[in-house]
Image (cartoon, helix red, strand yellow):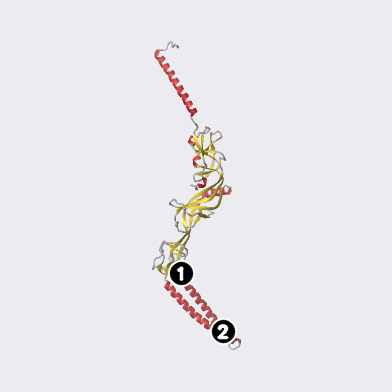
Amino acid sequence: MFLFIGVPMHGLFLLKGLIILWGIGAGLISCSSNEQASMPAPLVEVMTIESKDTPIVLTFVGQTEGSRSVEVRAQVSGILMNRAYEEGQYVEKGQLLFEIEPDTYKANLEQAQSMMEQAKAKFVQAQQERDRILPLYKKNAVSQKDRDSAVASYNAAKADLDAAKAEVTEAKIKLGYAYVKSPVSGYASKENKTIGNLITAGSSSDSLLTVVNQVNPIYANFSIPSPQYMHIKMLKSENLLTIDNPTATMTLADGSIYKETGKVTFIDKQVNPSTSVVAARAEFINPDAHVLPGQFVRVNVQGVILVNAILIPQKALIQTQKGTVVAVVNKENKVEMRPVRIGQNYGENFFVYSGLSNGDRVIVEGNNKAIPGQPVRLKESIQPAMNEAGGKK
């Protein structure tokens, strides 16, 4: 028994209360420490780094264009007499589109043919006279003057006949031009001149009748941003990327994929200073004219391969004041932060230049639970399907 000499009774009660509270607090602290020690390490999802040749798809915004857009212009002057096609309809190469005073040019042809017949008759007469005079001249039966006159008349008649033949040829050509035909197969636009108008050949404004757009094949023009173009060029120079006979698919405005696979036929070698892009083009067959000129599309370029590449999803990247890092799980299953140098994104995945090696385990889910130096439990993740990656966004 303890004796508290000189301590009032109410002081004894207070002292006992403090002792009890201290005992309860010590017990709570002990329980908390035990619970903390027994809590499992957080579960995180990791992907194991494996560098490999990785096909990627580069996607660009583009617009379709007819492979040939031909201005149909009048090559003879006259009154527009007839339009022989339906505006906006498909026309075949050689199909009649307009008529420009064909009767006038028929009459001109007939007149030229008549003049040619007259010239031909005079030529025959001059030829006969020459053939009669030349033997007589050899026998000294006619004078030199008679001989020279016969030869000159023959040559003049021949020149007149040649000129008359040329007039006939020109008249035939002009009559052909009076029937304006489509130079290509494609879709004819609206008429630029209506029936009854005077058409002036050779005039930039008065001679244009319509435009025909050839849509098979169809072009998809697209632009490559200059930073992306330079990035691709740099990777190629370092043998980190190959492009072998690139092909293309085309995503239409409704989200559907055009059924035909095209090919990339043109990439410019200069940057447009006004837009900072590089012009490029893909070509697709379009036999049923499913795709029309002027449509906005997405061009998906295939045949591009990243050589021995390491790519990780965007969600694995952690931005810090010192740069980009990733959470790596070491051999002891503890977390360490690893600085990385990343390049361009391809879809949801980023190209890693340095900082990671084959076999590294990178946390892709649960970064918020990963504490440097602390252990984690692992849930293995598969490597992203990089062959389905899109272009830079």
Secondary element under disc 2, as helix, strand or loop, is: helix
Residue type pointed to by label 2: Asp
Which disc, if any, is residue 131? Answer: 2
Depicted 45 relative to depicted 2: above or below: below
Which label's residue is closer to the chain start, 1 or 2? 2
| Mark 1 vs mark 2, CA separation in Å | 42 Å
Asked whether 210 or 366 is in front, the reply is 366
Which residue is denoted by mark 1 in the rendering? 177
Asked whether 392 or 301 is in front, the reply is 301
Q: Residues within 10 Å of mark 2 (few under 14, many from 20)?
A: some
Q: Residue furthest right?
A: 139
Q: Position of residue 43 (x, y in %)?
A: 49, 35
For image coordinates 45% across by 24% down, the residue present is: 28
Q: Position of residue 364 (x, y in %)?
A: 50, 39
Residue type pointed to by label 1: Tyr
For image coordinates 58% across by 49% down, the residue present is: 237
Image quarter hosting the N terminus = top left
Q: Residues within 10 Å of mark 1 (few under 14, many from 20)?
A: many
- Left or right placement of residue 267 versus residue 101 in this view: right
For image coordinates 42% across by 18% down, the residue present is: 17
